[in-house]
Image (spheres, coloured by chain):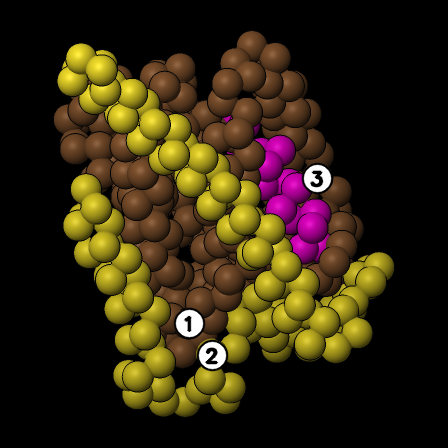
Chain colours: A brown, B yellow
Amino acid sequence: MHIAEGFLPPVHAIAWTAIALPFVVVSAYRVNRLMREQPQVKLLLAASGAYAFILSALKLPSVTGSCSHATGTGLGAILFGPSVMALLGTIVLLFQALLLAHGGLTTLGANVFSMAIAGPWIAYAVFHGTRRLHAPLAVSVFLAATLGDWGTYLVTAGQLALAFPDPVSGIAGAVLKFASVFALTQVPLAIIEGLLTVIIVNLLHQNSREELDLLAFAPENSR
Amino acid sequence: MKRTNFILLALVLLLLILPLILPIPSGLKAPFSGTDNQSQAAIIAAHPDYQPWFEPLWKPPSSEIEGLLFALQAALGSGLLGYYLGLRRGQSQARRQARDRIDAGD
């Protein structure tokens, strides 16, 4: 979902940066407060960031014959809330922009918006929406991580379409065109992210009960 | 729980291996190219006059170095995640053993 360096016109690059910036600032503030008030969960927060680090480094093959990567931001979003993920996702994207020439500084705002803001918020909304409908924990976790990942790529398709409307069919046509690059390829990869996230939550559930309780994650009586 | 996780992991592997053994969809110029590059190509195809106005400050000088940095990224993440999961597993096992010892009236 990385929009390459220089591949958004300046107005779009600035606009997405302006939209993403307040989220990242609030996120930094949230992370800071979390570390101060609940230092016991520091290591779990770092582990959630590490999870996003791993998943966004692995480009996986898909049935469409293309490769793409998962995002790994859903896990942290359902554990810590979506606002915390904006900072962690930005760190991942900065690493890739500066050291791997994947994504870029001018497109950082747009990439942060799709991967570190939209994806986590989708995951968070899906998680709590399905929990309210009494879905089992594993089902909620799976749907949250899968749809958060998939949604990230749809947002990217939308961002590219806004910047590069199709000469004939306009923005709507361009959305379809860019979505056709990302959406189908991402389906199995998003499912992989969903399954992996369920595995991690299972492991946390077994051995990290104290931290999950501190975070009021899936309290005992609702599991 | 352990069995569930193994089944989930097997599913993940299946989803990863299937694309590699299934016939590659016809009409692909380069099999398993990245979607990031494909979207870039789509931009250039529709807007041939678009000039990227900023270049990456630094590019890995070869695909080997790029592979190294991607592997480093995954390794750093795995190291930290593995450390965390292992630490908590050890702690909860130690707690269980201590409890068992008390139960046994040791």
Q: Position of residue A111 (x, y in %)?
A: 61, 48
Closer to viewer: mark 2 or mark 3: 2
Location of mark 1 (residue): A61
Give the CA distance from mark 3 to mark 1.
Answer: 31 Å
Q: Quick one: quadrant of the N terminus of chain B? A: top left
Q: Which mark is residue A17?
A: 3
Can residue A117 be seen?
no
Residue contact at pointers 3 and 1, CB within 8 angstroms: no
Q: Secondary structure at mark 3?
A: helix
Amino acid on which the number 2 mark rests in the picture? Phe
Front residue of this view, candidates B11 and A156? B11
Picture residue at 42% right of the left edge, 40% below the top: B86
Residue B8 vertical placement versus A91 (above, below):
below
Picture residue at 27% right of the left edge, 26% below the top: B97
Can residue B95 be seen?
yes
Amino acid on which the number 3 mark rests in the picture? Thr
Q: Secondary structure at mark 1?
A: strand
Q: Position of residue A215 (x, y in %)?
A: 40, 18
Closer to viewer: mark 3 or mark 1: 1
Name the chain letter of the residue that bears numbered label 3. A
Amino acid on which the number 1 mark rests in the picture? Pro
Give the CA distance from mark 2 to mark 3.
Answer: 31 Å
- B35 displayed left or right of A106: left
Q: Secondary structure at mark 2?
A: loop
**Residue closest to the far top:** A37
Location of mark 2 (residue): B32
Residue A40 vertical placement versus B46 (above, below):
above
Name the chain letter of the residue that bears numbered label 2. B
Q: Position of residue A148 (x, y in %)?
A: 40, 43
Magenta stretch, residue numbers:
A83-97
- A111 displayed left or right of B95: right
Prevailing SS of the magenta stretch: helix
